[in-house]
Amino acid sequence: MPVRLRKMIGMIIIVVLVIVYALVATTFASLLLGTSPWWVHLLYFFLTGLFWVLPAMLVIKWMEKPAKPR
């Protein structure tokens, strides 16, 4: 697969990942953490704000692989 195509596909995957992840994390928080203390909200949003990076790193690693020589 050409590098430019791989980067375009990876960019689309990352944008979709961030949107879906934000919607799921926010929905989960609003449904289950409504009556929790402020520090639980702070910890939850801090951790969920960091966890999206893990799948994004895998996509970026895939995007940056060198092209196979022909």
Image (tube, rainbow, N blue to C red):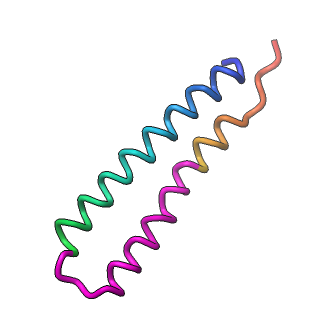
> 66 or 23: which is nearer to us?
23
Determine whether 61 is above or below 66 in the image: below
What is the count of numbered marks?
A: 0
In the rendered image, the residue lying farthest to the front is 38
Determine whether 17 is above or below 53 in the image: above
Q: What segment carries the magenta color?
A: 34-56
- Most frequent secondary structure within the magenta stretch: helix
The image shows residue 50 at horizontal and vertical percentages of: 51, 65
> 26 or 13: which is nearer to us?
26
Residue at the (31%, 85%) spot, across then down: 38
Q: Quadrant of residue 28?
A: bottom left
Position of residue 37 in the picture relative to residue 42 (left or right) = left
Residue at the (78%, 30%) spot, across then down: 66
Query: In the image, is residue 20 part of the stretch drawn in magenta?
Result: no
Position of residue 17 in the picture relative to residue 57 (left or right) = left
Residue at the (36%, 45%) spot, across then down: 20
Classify the position of the N terminus by image quarter.
top right
The image shows residue 46 at horizontal and vertical percentages of: 46, 73
Position of residue 22 in the picture relative to residue 35 (left or right) = right
The image shows residue 12 at horizontal and vertical percentages of: 51, 31
Residue at the (22%, 75%) spot, across then down: 33
Q: Quadrant of residue 37?
A: bottom left
In the rendered image, the residue lying farthest to the top is 70
Classify the position of the C terminus by image quarter.
top right
In the rendered image, the residue lying farthest to the right is 69
Determine whether 38 is above or below 67 in the image: below
